[in-house]
Image (cartoon, helix red, strand yellow):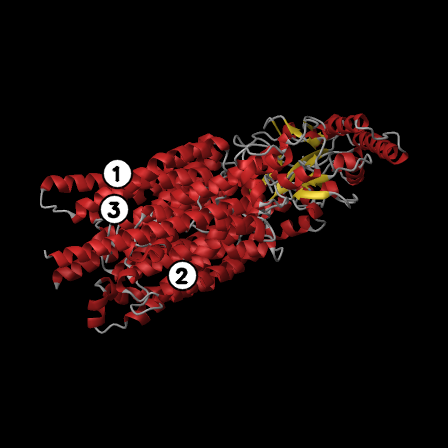
Amino acid sequence: MTVATLTALRVDRRRRTVRSVGVTTALACTVAALFVLTMMVGSYRLSAGQVIASVLHLTDNPSVDFVVRGLRLPTALAALAVGLALGASGTIFQQLLRNPLASPDFVGVTSGASLAAVSGIVLLHAAGLAVCAYALGGALLAALLMYVLAWRDGVSGYRFILIGIGVAAFLDGLIGYVLSRARLTEARQAMHWLTGSVGQASDTELRFLLYALLVLLPAAVLLQRQLRALELGDDSARALGVRTELSRASLLAIAVLLVALAVAVAGPIVFVALIAGPVANRLLGPAAGGIAAAALTGAALLLTADLVAVHLLPVPLPTGVVTGAVGAPYLLWLLATTNRQGVGG
Amino acid sequence: MHERAASSSRHIPRLNGSALISFGIKPVGIYTDEPVKTDPNLKDLDLTGITVLGEEWGKIDVEKAASLAPDLIVGDWWPAEKAYSGLEEGVDEKSKKLKELAPIVGISQGESIVDLAEGYENLAKSLGAKVDDPKVAANKQRFEAAVTAFKTATAAKPGLTAAAMAPSDENLSIANPKYAPELLDFQRWGLKVINPERPDPSFPYWETISWENADKYQPDLILWDSRVFTPTVNAEYGKKQPTWFKVKAAKAGAAVSWPGYWLHTYGDFAVELEKLTTAISAADENVGN
Amino acid sequence: MTTTSTVAARRASGLVVLCALLAVAAFLSIAQGSRSIDLSEVLRALGSLGGDGTINSTVTVELRVPRTLLGILVGAALGVAGAILQGVTRNPLADAGIMGINSGAAASVVFAITVLGIHGVEFYVWFAFAGAIGATVLVYSIASMGREGATPVKLALAGAAVTAGFGSLTSAIVMTDIDALNELRFWQVGSLAGRYAPILIGVAPFLLAGLAVSLGCGRALNGLALGEDLARGLGQRVALTRAAAFGVVALLAGAATAACGPIVFIGLVVPHLARFLCGPDYRWILPYSMLLAPIVLLLADVLGRVAGAPGELQVGVVLAVLCAPVFVGIVRYARLAEVGP
C-alpha cells in the first residue's frame, strides 16, 4: 500500500467522520427543536421560553406546570424515546439482514408484540404495565419464531421477507379472532392500543423505556463499530468469525429489544422503523449506516407525526394512523418507481 | 350492539351534564362516550355555552378542561371497574390526568335507575339547585305517575312475560336483568322479565343463542334494545331471519324499545316508562308460552 | 406409459374419494347444528322442501341448506384462490390476506357503515366485494410497475403496504365510531352464520364462474412454477398468465370474503394438503384443493355449531384453532423449495 493511497484513505475517512458528526448534530438540533415545539402548541399556547423554564423547573407557575410537566412532557418524551428506539432498531435490522425492506414492521416482530398485548387485554384483562410486558414477550417470541423458521435459509435473502410477511399476516389474522372474542369495552381498549399512539404511555412504562435506551443505544453504537472493525480487518482467523457472529447476534438482540419496548410503550406505530434508516442514509451520504443518525431521524419523524396527528388534523388521531397513512403511499411509491433488481427482487 | 360500551356513562367537568342540567345546573364542560348529537342523555337539552371536551370513550382534552378551571368533576361510578366513567383502565393516560384537576363525585351505577336518579337529585340539591322548581318537580311527579301507571298495567296482566332482546345478523342475544338496573326496576314493578337460563360465561349481561334456537324463549312482549330499535326493525328481521317469526311475539308485532343502559333522570325514565306502559296495555298475555 | 396412467388413475380415484367425503360433510352440515333435530325430521323437511312450517323444517331448509351450499362454494373458492396465489407468487405462505383483499374489504365495509349508514350483512356484501377487488387491482398494478413486473417480493410488499394503509384508514374511522367497530369486528372473523338464500344467490354466479375458469389454469401454473425464465423459454407469456390468474383470484377471494368475511388459513393450508396428497402438478392440485377446502370448512363449521350450542362459534375461530399448528408445521417441514423461487 503506497503512502498516497493511505493518505487518500485517511482523508476519505476524515471526510466521512466530519459528515457523520455534522449530520448527527444537525439532526439532534432538529429533534430538540421539535421536542420543544410539541410542548408549545395545544389548547394553551406557550412560548418556547415558558416550556423550557417549566421543564427545567426554573419557574413555578402551577397552571403552566400542570400542562407542560403533567400533560405534554410525557407525550413528548414518549415520542422522542419511541422514535429513537424504532429508528435505531429499523436500521440495525436493515443492515444486518442486508435488506432495505427488513424492517421489524414486516418480519412479524411488531405483529407478535401486538398479538400478545391484545390477547393480554382481552383474555387476561391485563392493563398498564402488564400489557407492556406481554408486548415485550410477544415481540421476543415472534423474533424467535422467525429465527427458527427462516434462519436456515439465510436471513439476507428475500425468502426471509416473504416468510416474515406470511408470519405477520398469520399473526394479524389471530389478532382479529382475539378481538372478536372480546367484550366491546375491551375490544375498544385493544383497538386503541393497536392503532399505536405516543399519548397512551403511562409514566412507569415510559421510564422503563428511557432507562433501557440509555443502555441499549450506546451498546448498539459500540457493537456496530466493533463489528465494522472486525469485518474490515483481517478476518482470516477462524476465531474472528465466531466473534463476528456473536456481535452480530447481540446487535440483532438489541434491535429486537428496542422495537419490542417501543411497541410495548406506544403500540405498533408502523413505517417509522422502515423509513428512518434510508432517510438517515440519504443525509449521511458516504457515511451511511450510522445508528445514532437513524435513531434521531426516527425521533424527528415521530415527533412530526404526532404534531400532525394531534394538532394539525381537524380531529386528533392516534399517531399510528398518520404514520400509516403517510408511510403506505411512500412504500408503494418506492415500489412503483424502483427498477433496481436488488429492490425489486 | 352488545354490551354497555355504547352506554351513557358521562362525566362532566365542573358539573354533570345530563343528570344535572335537567336540574338547572349548567356545567362548564362535558365529555361523552359518543357524539353529542346522538347521545340520548343529551337530547332536548340546551348545550349552549358548554365546552365539549371529548366525544369518544377514552379521549378527554384535559388541557382544554384545565383552561376551564373546574371546581368539581361529576361522573357515574362503575362498581365493577372501580372507576369513574371515562377514567377506567384502557383510556389514554392523558385522560386520566383529569382527576388531578378537581375532586370527582358521582353516583354509583347499581341495581336501580331510581337510585341513580335519586342520587343525582340529591347531588344537585347539595350543589344548590332548586329541586322544588316547578319544572323539576313536574318531572318527578310525571315519573311517579308513570310508575303507578306501569304497576297498574302489569297488575292487570299478571300472565304477561317480557324478554329484553338484541337480534343481530349472526345471533340473538337475551339480556340478563341481573346486570341491567332498568330491567330490575321493571321486575320490581310487576313486569315478568325473563331471566335467561345460561348467560354467556364471558359476559353474563347477555345470553347469546344461535338463530337455529331463536324459539328458545317465548315472551308475550319483546323489549328491543333501544340502540338498534326502529319502528320497522321487527318486520325487517322477520324478512331476513327465517326463524325470527318463530318467536310468537315477534310474529304478532309485540315489540317495544327498551332503554338499555343510558337512563339517569326521572324525566327520561318517565318518558320511557310511559311508552312501555302503552305497549304492556296493548300486549296480549297469551301470545308467548 | 403404464406408470403414468396408474398415477393418473390413483389421483382420479383420490378425487372420487374426496367427492364422497364432501357429500358426507355436506350431509353432516345439514343434519347437525346448535339445535338438535331428529334425522327423520331433517329428511322429511328436505323431502317436502320445508312445507310444514315447523321451526325444525325452517331451520333445515332455510338456514342449514343455504349455509351448507355457501360453505361449499366459499370453501372451494378460497382453496383454489390460495393454490393459484401460491403458484403465481411462488410464495408458500401466500393467501388472499397478503394481497390486501381483507383490508380493502374491511375498509369498504366500514365506509358503508359509517359514511353511508348501511347496516346488515346482506347490504355490505357488495361493498366488501368492491373493496376486495379494488385492493387487489391496486396491489397488482403497483407491483407490476417497473422492469421485472409483478415479482413475488414486490407483490408481498405492495400487499403489506396496501394493508397497512387501509388498516390506518379503517382504524381511524372505527376509533371514533363504536358501533362501526362492533359490526366490523364480527364481520372480520369470518362466519357462515346469518347468511341465507339472498346472499348465496347473489355471490354464486361469481364463484361458479371463477371456479370454472380456474380449472383451466393448471398448465399455466405448472409453467410458472418452473421459474420465470424457463416458463418464458417454453413460450409462455408470463405477464399475461399472471394477470389472468390474479383476475381469477380477485373474483374468487373477493366474492368469498364479501359473503362470509375474511376466512384466512384455509386458502393457506389446503393447497399444501393437496400438494401432499397429489404431488406438485397444478392440474391436480387445483381440483384437489377445490374439494378439500369445502370439506375442511364444513367440518369446522359443524364443529363450531355443535361445540358452541345453544350459541355458535364462528367458523373462522374454529379454523384458527385447527390450522395454527398445521401452519407452523408447513413452514417448518414442508419442502418449501417446491413452490419457492
The disc placed on residue A150 is 3
The residue lying at 15 percent from left, 47 percent from top is A233
Q: Is residue C238 left or right of residue B233?
A: left
C10, C119: nearer the viewer: C119
Q: Chain of mark 3?
A: A
Marks 2 and 3 on same chain: yes
Is C218 left, or right, of A296 in this rendering? left
Q: Nearer the viewer, residue A31 or B61?
A: A31
Q: Is residue C289 left or right of residue A27?
A: left
* Residue B18 image-quadrant placement: top right
The kind of residue on which mark 2 rests is Leu
* Gap in angstroms between the C-alphas marked 2 and 1: 32 Å
Q: Are marks 3 and 1 on the same chain?
A: yes
Query: On the image, numbered disc 1 is attached to which residue?
Result: A250
Separation (CA) of disc 3 from disc 1: 18 Å
Residue B165, x across and y down, in percent: 64, 39
Q: Are marks 2 and 1 in contact (CB under 8 Å)?
A: no
Where disc 1 sits, the SS reads helix
Q: Amino acid at mark 3?
A: Ala
Mark with earlier residue (3, 1): 3
Marks 2/3: CA–CA distance: 25 Å
> Is residue C312 among the parts visible in the rendering?
no
Q: Secondary structure at mark 3?
A: helix
Residue A127, above or below C52: above
